[in-house]
Image (cartoon, helix red, strand yellow):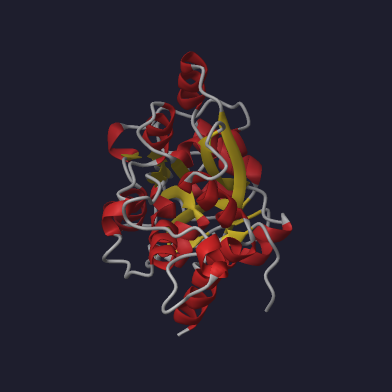
Amino acid sequence: MALGAAGALLLAGCGAPQQGGSGSAAEDVFTFTQDNFPRIDGSTSTVPLAQAICSVLLGESREDVADLTQFSKTTASYEALIYGEKDLLIAAEPAQSVLESKESQGFVWKMEPFAIEGLVFVVNANNPVDSLSVEQVQKIYTGEITNWSQVGGEDRDIIPFQRNPEAGSQALMKKLVMDGLEMMEPPVDYTAGSMSSLLEGVRQYDNSPAAIGYTVYYYAHDMEMAQGLKLLSIDGTAPSPDTIRSGEYPFLNPYYAVMDKDEAEDSPARILYDWLLGEEGQSLVAQEGYVSILEQEG
């Protein structure tokens, strides 16, 4: 029910098609259509938001706008923007390879945060460990800590899953957690090519609570991919919308809206970019379960 009411408000505010409207006020607003809608791309974890954006602005069901939200994941989406194949991204932190490609192509983007994300750590729900320190996480992923008994758990080898090098969560792991420390080289079976496969691997590894992995808070919590898993507290602070927004949880990074800096002021990409960062777009961000950069009433 809430989605329908909010959708009507957003449609009226952003200039999407109006039912039975007339007069100069209706003529002054921009109308998004399937034909003029920006080519959007981004991270796996922002696909649900993209579906909501398209549905609200076009006044169509999420099923009807599915073709507009076939995202190619974080690194590939940045490359697509740089090479002119996409118009607008809603994505996580770019990897170093993207920055190098951007530099080599002389591409200049306009990038601003639209939401705050937390990198979270997951273990099997049967693992008795509930919290790790930042230093303990670092030592697990450098290979210095190898047994759960070293961090208050059972006498069991730690199996630390990682993401593939191009993944947005891998870039976040290196930036937010490792802080220049070299991550151990994981066996190929412990490198997950998608968020869902990482979570599934941690949940089911050897039918035991030996594994640990990481993902973003939205994906683990709001998409209910963490069933059979639990989120670890870091230095005693559990990840939640409140601790992420306040900055109490330590591993934080924005989601970014990104476009070519030279997009015309009246281009659909620029209009959508500005709308997403405004009050109505931010209301939808929060409504979809992401942590908005603006304080939300209620």
Residue drawn at (47%, 64%) of the image: 221
Tell me if residue 91 can be seen.
no
Q: Residue furthest bottom?
A: 1
Identify which residue is drawn at 53% across, 50% down: 271
Count of marks placed on residues: 0
Residue closest to the eye, 226 or 102: 102
Residue 249 figure quarter:
bottom right
Q: Is residue 258 visible?
A: yes
The quarter in which the N terminus is drawn is bottom left
Q: Measured from the top left, where is residue 7 in percent x and y?
A: 48, 74
Quadrant of residue 9 within the rendered picture: bottom right
Q: Nearer the viewer, residue 27 or 232?
A: 27
**x then y, percent, for residue 48:** 40, 60
Q: Is residue 256 above or below residue 207?
A: above
Establish if 212 lies above or below 51: above
In the image, 39 versus 69, the foreground residue is: 39
| In this view, 102 is above or below 273 | above
Instruction: Tell me the quarter of the image containing the C terminus.
Output: bottom right
Name the residue located 53 percent from the left edge and 40 percent from the top edge: 258
Q: Residue at x 63, y 31 (%)?
A: 179
Position of 24 compared to 226: left or right? right
Residue extending furthest toward the top: 104
Query: Which x, y percent locates residue 200?
Result: 31, 55
Q: Front-most of 290 and 246?
A: 290
- Above or below, comparing residue 227 to residue 250 in the picture: below
The image shows residue 177 at horizontal and vertical percentages of: 60, 39
